[in-house]
Image (cartoon, rainbow, N blue to C red):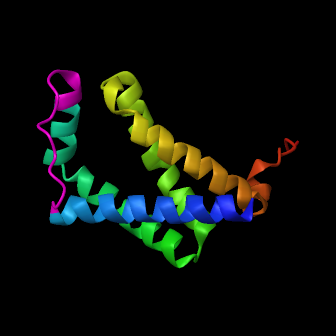
Amino acid sequence: MKITALVARILLGIMFVVFGLNGFLHFIHQPPPPAGLAGQFLGALAMSHYFTFIFAIQLIAGILFLINRYAPLALTIIAPVLVNILLYHALMDVKGIGPGLFATVLWCLLAYSHRSAFAGILQPTVPQE
């Protein structure tokens, strides 16, 4: 499991550093936005500068994964990004869901190896009277 977690951490780190940097430096050619609702959604994210924060979060999480510091924090901050990637592709543009699914599988493998860091939030609370 240690080797699997190491490979998952490095792949996630590389993936999010590259795509986070690409958001700022534009070194990977992006195809034109799709037509319809998916294109409108991406246009709204771009016009509102929401993407700037997403790319910054990706870059920060990727660096944390690569330097192997605060991996549980990196897992926590990148989880909402992965959820949004999956929801976007599942609901608006299904053909591009592959990389999001791959990143989610890597995230799950790494989260499982750091499950002790999340033990406190996964315990039920007793209602106070």
In the image, residue 59 above or below residue 84: below
In the rendered image, which quarter contains the C terminus?
top right
Q: Residue at x 49, y 43 (%)?
A: 102
Q: From the viewer's side, name the closer residue of 18 and 33.
A: 18
Identified at 57% across, 58% down, the residue is 8
In the rendered view, tell whether residue 60 sits above or below residue 11: below
- Judge whether residue 84 can be spotted in this image: no
Q: Is residue 11 magenta?
A: no
Give residue 68's position: percent from left, percent from top.
57, 75
Instruction: Please give left or right for residue 58 compared with residue 128 in the image.
Output: left
Q: Is residue 60 visible?
A: yes
Picture coordinates of residue 28 (x, y %)? 19, 55
Figure quadrant of residue 69: bottom right
In the displayed structure image, the side of residue 107 where residue 96 appears, left or right: left
Q: Is residue 27 magenta?
A: yes
In the image, the segment drawn in magenta is 26-39
Q: Is residue 121 left or right of residue 60?
A: right
Q: Is residue 34 above or below residue 84?
A: above
Residue 70 on image: x %, y %: 59, 73
Residue name at image x 66 percent, y 61 percent: 5
Q: Nearer the viewer, residue 59 or 27?
A: 27
**Dominant SS in magenta:** loop
Instruction: Give the residue displayed 15% in from the left and 60% down from the top.
Output: 26
Quarter holding the N terminus is: bottom right
